[in-house]
Amino acid sequence: MSKRKRFVLVSLLLTLGLFGIQFIRVDYRYQAILLLGGLAYVFCGWALSEDLHKIEWLTALTLPVIYPVSVGLFYFLLPERMLSRLIILGIFGVGMYALLLTENIFTVAAIRTIQLLRAARAVGFLLTLVTAFFLFDTIWSFRLPFYANAILVGLASVPLIFQALWSVELTEDRIERRTVVYSLCLSLAIGELALALSFWPVTVSVGSLFLVTMAYVGLGISQYHFSGRLFRRTLYEYLGVGMIVLLTTYLVTKWG
């Protein structure tokens, strides 16, 4: 079976799995979502197995596992309308297929130069932010204490940032020390922002978008730094986006 057929099959199976979870009793849905994540690792590992080597079984499969889990968690926050859920399922299936293509390019690019690498990094960056939004939105919807928000947001950020930074390094036999250090530092910063934001009367969507934007700023700057292309203009552009979103969040927050 060709790779593309494998990718299509895996995307369909995971989409059907996500659809089937809604028929499981509420008490067991979180366990079912974790099971979906485990199946995603097995299925995606099988689909990409030809080019996976050493640490790529961890790095290249991180996002393909977290993505369906995040969508599964977000899926049950939606209104119980079949149309909206079918739309999410369709978007998920397309996103899963695109993600498998992206990770395939990463694993090949770790061995030899490939022209589609820049496009793959853009898609991977986008799906990382989408996944982060789903996770942050789920965490924020629980209305947890400030320390729980900080811990959960920080922990959720670690693997997402780690795999995104690895996509710049693309090492197959080792994990660079700076990748680990930057992942932990950026995740800590996002967790601290979540802690501070817990004291603001923001809505779930606004809070999640703010955190995702800050992740976009930190991760974008770090990726440019890793690739040796972080110029002053690029830095100012990212910081400008962060300041605009911070100001917008402040203005749309109902303080009264």
Image: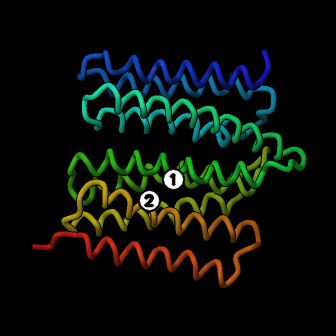
Residue picked out by circle 1: 129
Q: Are marks 1 and 2 in contact (CB under 8 Å)?
A: yes
Label 2 crowding class (10 Å Cα cut-off): few <14, some 14-19, many 20+? many
**Quadrant in which residue 86 is drawn:** top left
User: Residue 72: x, y in percent?
Assistant: 40, 32
Q: Nearer the viewer, residue 6 or 27?
A: 6
From this view, report whether residue 209 is shown above or below residue 78. Answer: below
User: Residue 30: x, y in percent?
Assistant: 33, 28
Q: Quadrant of the N terminus?
A: top right
From this view, report whether residue 61 is shown above or below residue 174. Answer: above
Q: Taking 154 as reference, is 231 left or right? A: right
Q: Nearer the viewer, residue 126 or 169?
A: 126
Check disc 2 and give the amino acid type.
Answer: Val
Label 1 crowding class (10 Å Cα cut-off): few <14, some 14-19, many 20+? many
**Quadrant in which residue 34 is drawn:** top left
From this view, report whether residue 9 is shown above or below residue 121. Answer: above
Q: Residue at x 57, y 52 (%)?
A: 126
| Dot 2: element | helix
Q: Quadrant of the C terminus?
A: bottom left
User: Residue 19: x, y in percent?
Assistant: 41, 21
User: What's the mark number on residue 212?
Assistant: 2
Q: Residue furthest right?
A: 112
Q: Residue furthest front?
A: 83
Q: Residue at x 40, y 62 (%)?
A: 211
Q: Earlier in the sequence, mark 1 or mark 2?
A: 1
**Quadrant in which residue 248 is drawn:** bottom left
Q: Residue at x 70, y 21 (%)?
A: 6
